Image (cartoon, rainbow, N blue to C red):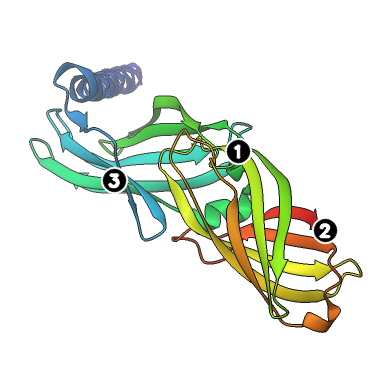
Amino acid sequence: MRQSIRAIGWTVTISTLILFTFLASAVYSIVQIALLDQGIRMGDLQTEFKDASLKLSMPISINNTGYYEINEFRITTTLEEEDGGLIATNTTVMTGIKRGESRSEMHILSLNFNDLLSKMNYLLFNDTEIKLLISVGFKYAYALELQISMANLSIPWGAPFYGLSLKELDLRGSNGTHLFLELSLDFENHFFSDIGGPMYLIVYNEDGEQIGEGIGFLHVPSGGRPKESIPIIVALTRPESFTGRGYVDVSFKFPISKNPIELGRIEYG
């Protein structure tokens, strides 16, 4: 009886030692991969703006210098609003990276410009910060699972129509079929690039009846302001309803956007 108890005790002790040794070597391997041997390499974050999408890409390289297999490696990048609201997120997963094996992948996070503006219209008119969060996770040696935050960055966002004000709409003339208008507006382009595109006007008389539509063109360099008023020719669809007074709804269309963006309303006459 005593020999059986002693044998069980030795078995438990040996099993505990084996488990402790395994866990210690597994933890050491993770430290070795992540820190000592720089087995995890993340390249520079690259940005590309194409086809109405902003693409963030980052090369990831894993070199398993540890003692055991990396069952799963995942990297997640997340873009959040300043108050924590989710903008976009994506995860890249690599599995079955054996001891001594290397693996490379390109991690990509895409952000559709049209979706961004339709969901967060305030970004057109307000400067803010966008948070970029990067985290990695391990499943290692079929026993350990870790989640590590690698970066928490703030990216400044510059509004293309910062401080927008529709100042004045002058009626320069009419020939019975067309109106000749000049629109004065003021804002500062804080966006990372120039903005340019058509401005659309829907014209109403003082009774709220739509009487015509017009188009002009706006171009403002990054960091600049509009220097001159914008000439706009309006085709009258109901010339008999033109009274010389009314209001206009103004919108602007980025070349990459599907729909015009409403900028506001201004009176004329």
From the top left corner, tell me how far across and down residue 204 is, in percent: 80, 69
Q: Is residue 69 visible?
A: no
Quarter of the view holding residue 25? top left
- Residue 231 versus residue 261: which sits nearer the camera? 231
Kind of residue indicated by mark 3: His
Image quadrant in which the C terminus is located: bottom right
| Label 3 packing within 10 angstroms: few (<14), some (14-19), many (20+) | many
Label 3 SS: strand
Quarter of the view holding residue 148? top left
Label 2 SS: loop
Question: Which mark is in front, 2 or 1?
Answer: 2
Query: Label 3, on which residue?
Result: 107
Q: Is residue 35 left or right of residue 111?
A: left
| Label 1 packing within 10 angstroms: few (<14), some (14-19), many (20+) | some
From the top left corner, tell me how far across and down residue 83 is, in percent: 64, 32
Q: Is residue 256 left or right of residue 185?
A: left
Quarter of the view holding residue 250? bottom right
Query: Label 2, on which residue?
Result: 269
Kind of residue indicated by mark 1: Phe
| Label 2 packing within 10 angstroms: few (<14), some (14-19), many (20+) | few
- Residue 37 versus residue 226: which sits nearer the camera? 226
From the top left corner, tell me how far across and down residue 248 is, in percent: 75, 61
- Residue at 70% x, 65% y is 173
Question: Which mark is in front, 3 or 2?
Answer: 2
Among numbered discs 2 and 1, the one appearing first in the sequence? 1
- Residue at 29% x, 19% y is 20
The Cα–Cα distance between marks 3 and 1, rounded to whole angstroms, is 37 Å
Q: Is residue 53 visible?
A: yes
The Cα–Cα distance between marks 2 and 1, rounded to whole angstroms, is 23 Å
Q: Which mark is residue 187?
A: 1
